Image: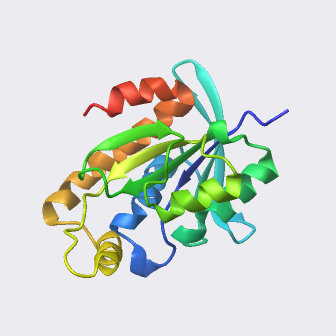
């Protein structure tokens, strides 16, 4: 029988040079959840920072793992699948939080399944899990204006920082992302979609 734990993974790149970049939105949101849920991280096989806890909310008792992969974005699946296999967590009880260039900054889309949309972290997780049936909290970072070398512009964009206005809005945006992940685990994916997708 599969575990009743939830696994919530925020994606990003480890290392101080990546802190505060668009591609690390998942890490930042995981940090918000860690603070909110009083989670301390420890090492999981050198693949991830991993914390666990119990959330008592709205009359429900939710057991969870909170993860920040240390594998770099393109290998995120190695960390997520290792934790899922070790603790016997089904894809349907996994929530992945990540940046998304197809959404404007400040927009959140909650979904399960579907395409990776060009996101290398999601492609890696799909491949490693052999499933895309997990939930995703997509945090909009807007799109680079692709002039000239499209690939390099995209890389520079996702590894770039936020404007001053965006930095001011970031704490509320990350709190909303954390709320979305919490809503999926405590209530349902459908409720999270209804609450956040239309904003």
Residue 41 visible in rendering: no
- Spot occupied by residue 89 in the image (x, y as percentages of width and height): 74, 42
Of 162 and 54, which appears nearest the observer? 162
- Spot occupied by residue 26 in the image (x, y as percentages of width and height): 45, 56
Quadrant of image for the C terminus: top left
Question: Given the current orientation, which residue lies at the most extreme left position?
Answer: 165
Query: On the image, which quarter does residue 94 sit in?
Result: top right
- Look at the image and name its color scheme: rainbow
Of 65 and 196, which appears nearest the observer? 196
Rendered residue at 29%/50% (across/down): 103
Quadrant of image for the N terminus: top right
- Spot occupied by residue 22 in the image (x, y as percentages of width and height): 34, 65
The answer to whether 26 is drawn above or below residue 91 in the figure is below
Residue 12 visible in rendering: yes
- Spot occupied by residue 16 in the image (x, y as percentages of width and height): 44, 79
Rendered residue at 72%/40% (across/down): 90
Rendered residue at 57%/18% (across/down): 59
Question: Given the current orientation, which residue lies at the most extreme right position?
Answer: 1
Rendered residue at 78%/51% (across/down): 85
Q: How many marks?
A: 0
Q: For this view, does 89 lie left or right of residue 21?
A: right
Q: For this view, does 93 lie left or right of residue 82?
A: left
The answer to whether 157 is drawn above or below residue 185 in the figure is below
């Amino acid at each position: 029988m599969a575990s009743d734990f939830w696994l919530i993974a925020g994606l990003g790149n480890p290392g101080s040079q990546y802190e505060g970049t668009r591609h690390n939105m998942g890490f930042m949101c995981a940090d918000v959840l860690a603070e909110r849920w009083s989670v301390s991280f420890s090492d999981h096989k050198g693949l991830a920072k991993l914390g666990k806890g119990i959330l008592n909310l709205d009359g429900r008792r939710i057991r969870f793992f909170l993860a920040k992969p240390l594998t770099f974005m393109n290998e995120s699946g190695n960390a997520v699948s290792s934790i899922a296999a070790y603790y016997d967590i089904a894809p349907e009880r996994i929530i992945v939080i990540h940046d998304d260039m197809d959404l404007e900054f400040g927009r959140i889309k909650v979904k399960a399944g579907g395409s990776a949309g060009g996101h290398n972290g999601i492609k890696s997780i799909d491949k490693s899990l052999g499933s895309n049936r997990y939930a995703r909290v997509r945090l909009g970072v807007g799109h680079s204006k692709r002039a000239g070398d499209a690939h390099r512009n995209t890389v520079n964009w996702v590894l770039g920082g936020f404007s001053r206005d965006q930095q001011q809005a970031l704490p509320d945006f990350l709190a909303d992302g954390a709320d979305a992940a919490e809503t999926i685990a405590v209530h349902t994916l459908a409720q999270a979609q209804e609450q956040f997708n239309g904003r």
